[in-house]
Amino acid sequence: MKLDVATQEDVIPVTKLALQFYRKTKWNDIRPIEASVMRESILGLIMSPISDIIIVRRGEDIIGAAGMVSGAYWANPSLTLASEIFWYINPDFRRSKAGKLLFEGMDAWTAQRRCLASQLQASAGEEASRLKNVYTSKGYDELEHSYLKKL
């Protein structure tokens, strides 16, 4: 397995992973997404100067991906922040070193961007306590909880 940054050639396999992630979230309950829309979003992240998609390859296959965006924190422009907007690992590789590599890649990307902090999200639900343990073991502090209401 190896870390890489997604290019335009990776749009289709990354889109497949991102769709698997999205369709498991409550966002999908509010507004299901078409593959073509997700593909455009993935391409936008790859092409933007403030974002990238970190990927884990196993041979020719992409088995994990994380979308990262950098910028100033809204309340304090001198606080540069990297924010993960999605990350997903193929379920067949969840207990492999893919997750560890993805964390390393997100941290390296944050450092390369000279960001002072990195913010990661964790979905609520049955995996929340396990993910909290994983995040805190990697040096992340719990920050806040968010709530979603369909209107």
Image (cartoon, rainbow, N blue to C red):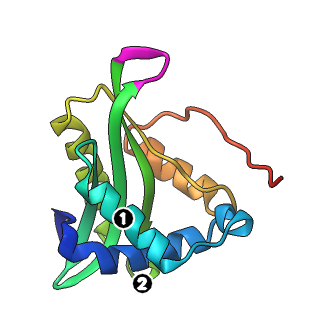
Give amino acid for label 1.
Ile
Instruction: Determine whether the residue tagged by mark 1 lies in a helix, strand or loop.
Output: helix
Residue drawn at (68%, 66%) of the image: 31
Q: Which residues are magenta?
A: 73-78
> Would you say residue 126 is visible in this rendering?
no
Most common SS among magenta residues? strand
Quickly name the residue at label 2.
Answer: 92
Indicate which disc residue 80 carries: none
Based on the displayed image, in which of its 4 quarters is residue 6 positioned? bottom left
Instruction: Determine whether the residue tagged by mark 2 lies in a helix, strand or loop.
Output: helix
Distance of label 2 from label 1 (alpha carbons): 22 Å
Quickly name the residue at label 1.
Answer: 42
| First along the sequence among labels 2 and 1 | 1
In the rendered image, the vertical position of residue 36 relative to residue 87, given as above or below: below
Which mark is nearer the camera, 2 or 1? 1
Give amino acid for label 2.
Asp
The N terminus: image quadrant: bottom left
The one nearer the camera, 35 or 71, is 35
**Left or right of 136 in this view: 34:** right
Judge the density around disc 1: few (<14), some (14-19), many (≥20) Cα neighbours within 10 Å: many
| Residue 77 is inside the magenta segment | yes
The one nearer the camera, 4 or 30, is 30
**Left or right of 35 in this view: 68:** left
Residue drawn at (27%, 44%) of the image: 107
User: How far across and down, in percent of the image, does residue 64 sit?
Assistant: 34, 70
